[in-house]
Amino acid sequence: MKREQIKEYLAQMRLPTQDDYALTTSNKTFPDGAHFRTEELPLTIDDYERLYVAADRLHLVVNRITDTRGLMFDSDQEIIDKLTLARAHGSEVIMGPGAAEQPYDMSQQAEIHALVEGKVRGMDQLVYTVHSMLNAAQLGCRGFLMYDEGILMVALKMRGDGYLPPTTKFKISANISVANAAAIKFWFNMLDQQDAINPVRDLPLPMISAMRQVTDSPLDLHMYHGQTVARIMEAPEMIRVGSPLYLKNARSGPGVSIEDRVKLCYRVVEEIAKHYPQARQSQPGAEDMAIPAESGTTW
């Protein structure tokens, strides 16, 4: 089969035949009509408190918290305190079940990165991790970060069977490495409309635009990652071709404080307002967001 024949075959599958170098403007939005939402990554309750103080000072709306600390490291009260603070600010919370991205058992595979961060080694660890998720749901969490296909399969069935709230949101982690439009379609065919995917962290605009052609669902894209990714100047174009987008701030490294990260998020929003002013950000508490419930809330 020649390359052109492969492209014809892809077209029959309703897939892009190449990345979108025309950078087509997206006409898709979140259910509230917004084009983008912000996403911050605090880990401790102290981080949460400092983040919201800094955001309030700048009048910055934090739409989502993604907490990669790992539920096993938080007491029930710490989880409740985090969720209560986020709920008061109208932020949804996506938590990493179990150990999240941390090394978690006697094997050294995770420690030396022979096992990808977030993968769950063995069925015992799967049971422990699922239990942590169910416990967090009882405490009010309505969103979970998915690193592992086995955990995701079980969690999707549990949501369908009522063991997790039907409004629970699952987010595919960047660690799963979704890197092309066909892969985006594969994963969204398994997920529900409320769920989200964080593709790989370094996608150029034509690849983002091609992904947008195959789904109306939100994508989560890194504005910052570690000290190697900073896409402030590209943010307006990323929204133009890729909306609806969550703009993820995973800036980290020596000397990078919570307050510094909030200021960097504000710089992105400022750049969008300057160069793509028609783009709207969701306000706190948008209806489709995984806003935490009060602890003990039934479903």
Image: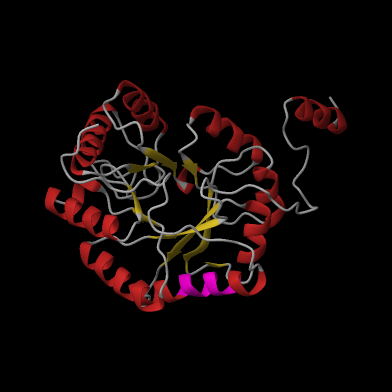
Q: Position of residue 285 (x, y in %)?
A: 38, 53
Whether residue 257 is visible: no
Residue 106 percent location from the top left of the image: 22, 41
Magenta stretch containing residue 256, yes or no? no
Residue plotted at (55% across, 50% down): 200
Instruction: Describe residue 204's horizontal placement relative to residue 1 as left or right.
Output: left
Residue 291: tell me if it is visible: yes
Q: Quadrant of residue 54?
A: bottom left
Q: Position of residue 178 (x, y in %)?
A: 55, 42
Magenta segment, which residues? 264-271
Is 38 situated above or below 70?
below
Q: Is residue 288 above or below residue 46?
A: above
Q: Which residue is depicted at the point 59% across and 71% down?
A: 273
Q: Quadrant of the C terminus?
A: top left
Q: Is residue 213 left or right of residue 179?
A: right
> Which quadrant of the view contains residue 268?
bottom right
Q: Is residue 265 magenta?
A: yes
